[in-house]
Amino acid sequence: MFFIITKNAITIFLLYKEKRHVISLGMTKPPVFYNTNFTRYILGQLFAFPSAWIYGSALMWVTLQITNSPLLLGIMGMCSSLPYLVLAPITGSMAERYDRRKLTLLTNVINLVQSSLLALLAFAGLVNYPILVIFALINGVAGAIQEPARLAFLLDMVGPEHLIQASALGSVTFNIARILGPIIAGILLTIHSGYCFALAALFTIPSIAMFAIIDVKSTKIEPRGSMLVQFVEGARYISGQKIPFLILFTIVLASTFGYGITILSSAIASEVLKLGSIGYGLLQSSVGVGALTGALVISMTKSRQGIMAKFRTSSIMQAVMGLALAAVLLLYPIIWLAIPLYAIFGYMMVNQNVLAISILPMVTQEGYIGRVMGFYSFAVSGIMPFGNLVAGGLTQLLTIPIGLLVSYAILVIPTFAICVSPKALNRDPFQNKIQP
């Protein structure tokens, strides 16, 4: 696996240096890599995403060690996601009013500063639960601003013809980080949590450098009223479009009931599977292995035909795999049974999300894309405060395995109903682009 990752990273670098020729190292590269700006973007994300995973993994592990409470762990996860909910009325509009590249660059600088400060506090022995909550909120604000801007900016860079591949390759980078980040964090946590936060800060620097040299003119629209007015206008647009509405509603269901096994991974590792920090890192990384595999499979997609069917299947199977994993944790809490189910869950999860961020911009009228992607960020991360509370509350009340079993049982039924209904997501959305 390390050889494959290294080989792909070297190939990306060579493509960046050689704009007019594809240097394949024995592999066929997708056409999107001819785009120099996209290559710069990917190089930046090769550092930004590991930074986020190292930071997040350390934050949740330190929280559990300080509090020893699944409920407080869920509240911490809620604090990381709450800004997506509170700022939803403005972040999507910001992605249309302002330069998306500059917004992404600014939030990376914020991440550099806050990771550095948290590292200093950790080494000084001044970290406690309220301080962790404050930094989780800061991190959430930066993410709430960055996510819709970055997702909409991807369309600016590559255009609709390469958006599926670009989204999938961005997800490949994200899930390489999902594999390596928690493992690195697990090892560093055995020494000192401060090293995790310091490395997260260090990894942010190359990402800032890459975004500083990307040369793409961001699509902007002339403001029509305040950001709140634009938010209401965007909400009205989505409510009148069946496919965007149902895709976003499916994501909302997953965010509310479907991410419990990832939110509570540290508690599952420590209390159910009786693992240390390295075992926790392995458990987290197994989700990344499945997600990376799913992203690689989607990156080979050359046509939009059939991607709606893939979205439906992955949405249903994500709920089913969560239910299966909860049953294993209840009946046979063994790490070697949990890891493959975590991996399959990760495969389905990344399929659902990559396909959603590929479909939504292509079925949305120009002038609404930033706001639609803002609603997607809200659906994924803004709803997570409730999902974190659901996961933390149910597991505190019913034990971790039973709480997860109840959560995924609730998720399966409406997801299946939306994805199987012949009047829902069963037509080809690309025959005619949806109009307002």
Image (tube, helix red, strand yellow):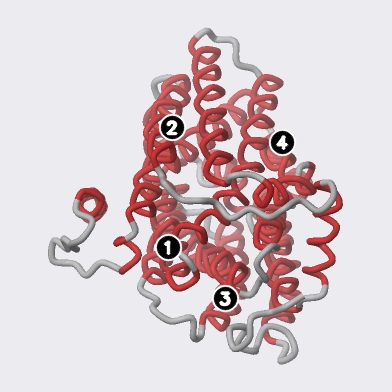
Image coordinates of residue 375 in percent, x first then y, are 72, 57
Q: Look at 42% across and 63% down and name the residue there.
A: 166
Could you tell me which quadrant the N terminus lies in? Answer: bottom left
Q: Which residue is mark 3?
A: 311
Q: Which residue is mark 1?
A: 166
**400 sits left or right of 158 in the view:** right
Q: Secondary structure at mark 4?
A: helix
Mark 3–mark 1 Cα distance, whole angstroms, equals 17 Å
Is 101 placed above or below 378 here? above
Q: Secondary structure at mark 2?
A: helix
Q: Going from the N terminus, do you reach mark 1 or mark 2 first?
A: 1
Give the number of the mark in front: 2 or 3: 2
Give the number of the mark in front: 4 or 2: 2
Q: Residue furthest top?
A: 124
Give residue 204's mark.
2
Q: Going from the N terminus, do you reach mark 4 or mark 3 first?
A: 4
Mark 4–mark 3 Cα distance, whole angstroms, equals 29 Å
Q: Are marks 3 and 1 in contact (CB under 8 Å)?
A: no
Q: How would you rate the neighbour count of disc 1 (Cα within 10 Å): few for under 14, some for 14-19, many for 20 or more?
A: many
Mark 4–mark 2 Cα distance, whole angstroms, equals 22 Å
Q: Look at 48% across and 40% down and name the residue there.
A: 53
Give residue 79's mark.
4
Q: Going from the N terminus, do you reach mark 2 or mark 3 first?
A: 2
Q: Amino acid at mark 1?
A: Ala
Image coordinates of residue 216 in percent, x first then y, are 46, 50
Mark 1–mark 2 Cα distance, whole angstroms, equals 21 Å
Relative depth, front residue between 105 and 295: 105
Q: Amino acid at mark 4?
A: Cys
